[in-house]
């Protein structure tokens, strides 16, 4: 009997850099292997799928494409759902290993095996459950043609003759939801900045809100808010919502740099300024060491949407309150 991989030929395969070594022929072989392990998507038995992934790791990539998640997103949801910590570093390393050697059986230690099992279990549960109605202003990540209605939608997609494997491969190459996430990132960020503006306005605090990529004398990268003005900076505020640890790390570096600019000004006999960080998103909760650096650089002046009401009273902003 032919396995899904025994008929794969590289003669007509194509590859792009984003695939990381995974041709469509290899990906389709993983799709067929997953289809066999689930009896045509009749039953997503997480134990059967886990065993299939051990023998043919590319199945892991196919499963992720069905979810429409990036590796860090899958790890985050799994950590929240299973209470088993799956770090972004672990899943990125695993994903990179599988893309480099998609057909080499996995050798996992006890801890890694537990994490992969939890990832698979979470994926199976989400795919069976399908999407939920979140209202008109939000989009559920499983609100896709194949996963919106749970497993029945997956079966229908696989059975109606649509090239489901090709759809999943294109989703894999296209960085799932990344385009949409990038397109709304400024809108999400504006929500945090609007909350800051509202708090400052209610307290009657004068503030200079900078524009994107605006050049401000004395700052190689302008902070989001300068109080009371760029001509006499006494307090600066950096604001950022991010779901990615890399972006969060960049913001931490910017906050640290602002702190260094303030210290340099004091050393030169000029007035320094207080640095405040207003943050949101899971990206800041991934690396504790980065959060430690931010807390040190701001002297503990880090705020989220939950404690934004204390922004003025707990910082030097209270010195500029007029209401």
Image (tube, grey):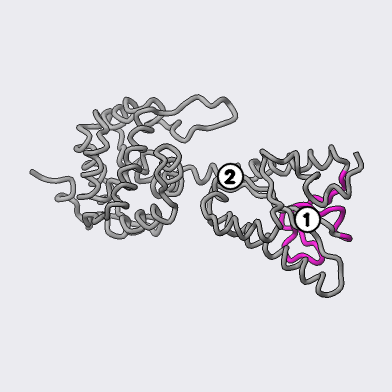
* Rendered-image quadrant of the N terminus: top left
Instruction: Look at mark 1 in the image and give the residue it sits on.
Output: 236
Q: Is residue 50 above or below residue 42?
A: below
Across the whole image, how many numbered discs are drawn on residues?
2
Relative side of 16 to 245, left or right: left
Q: Give coordinates of residue 110: x percent, y percent.
A: 27, 52
Instruction: Identify the residue shown where x is 24% and y is 30%.
Output: 43
Q: Is residue 100 above or below residue 306?
A: below
| Foreground pick, 296 / 2 | 296
Instruction: Look at mark 2 in the image and give the residue it sits on.
Output: 281
* Residue 194, quarter of picture: top right
Instruction: Identify the residue shown where x is 26% and y is 29%.
Output: 159
Q: Residue furthest left?
A: 1
Q: Is residue 184 magenta?
A: no
Marks 1/2: CA–CA distance: 21 Å
**Disc 2: CA contacts within 10 A as few (<14), some (14-19) or many (>=20):** some
Residue at disc 2, secondary structure: loop
Q: Give coordinates of residue 187: x percent, y percent.
A: 65, 41
What range is drawn magenta here?
Answer: 205-232
């Amino acid at each position: 009997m032919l396995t899904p991989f025994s008929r794969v030929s590289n003669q007509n395969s194509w590859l792009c850099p984003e695939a990381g070594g995974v041709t469509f022929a290899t990906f389709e072989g993983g799709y067929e292997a997953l289809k066999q392990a689930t009896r045509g998507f009749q039953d997503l038995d997480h134990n059967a799928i886990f065993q299939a992934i051990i023998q043919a790791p590319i199945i892991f990539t196919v499963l992720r494409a069905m979810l429409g998640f990036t590796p860090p997103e899958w790890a985050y949801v799994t950590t929240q759902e299973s209470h088993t910590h799956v770090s972004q570093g672990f899943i990125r390393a695993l994903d990179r290993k599988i893309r480099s050697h998609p057909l080499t059986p996995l050798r996992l230690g006890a801890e890694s095996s537990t994490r992969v099992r939890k990832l698979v279990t979470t994926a199976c549960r989400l795919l069976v459950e399908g999407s939920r109605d979140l209202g008109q202003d939000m989009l559920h990540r499983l609100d896709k043609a194949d996963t919106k209605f749970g497993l029945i939608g997956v079966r229908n997609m696989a059975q109606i003759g649509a090239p489901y494997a090709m759809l999943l491969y294109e989703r894999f190459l296209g960085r799932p939801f990344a385009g949409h996430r990038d397109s709304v990132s400024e809108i999400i960020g504006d929500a945090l900045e609007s909350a800051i503006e509202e708090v400052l306005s209610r307290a009657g605090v004068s503030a200079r809100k900078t524009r994107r990529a605006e050049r401000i004398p004395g700052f190689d990268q302008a902070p989001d808010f300068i109080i009371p003005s760029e001509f006499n900076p006494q307090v600066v505020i950096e604001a950022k919502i991010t779901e990615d640890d890399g972006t969060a790390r960049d913001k931490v570096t910017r906050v640290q740099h602002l702190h260094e600019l303030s210290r340099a000004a004091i050393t030169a006999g000029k007035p320094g300024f207080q640095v405040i960080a207003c943050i949101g998103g899971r990206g800041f909760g991934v690396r504790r060491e980065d959060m430690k650096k931010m807390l040190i650089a701001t002297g503990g002046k880090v705020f989220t949407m939950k404690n934004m009401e204390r922004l003025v009273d707990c910082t030097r902003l209270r010195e500029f309150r007029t209401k």
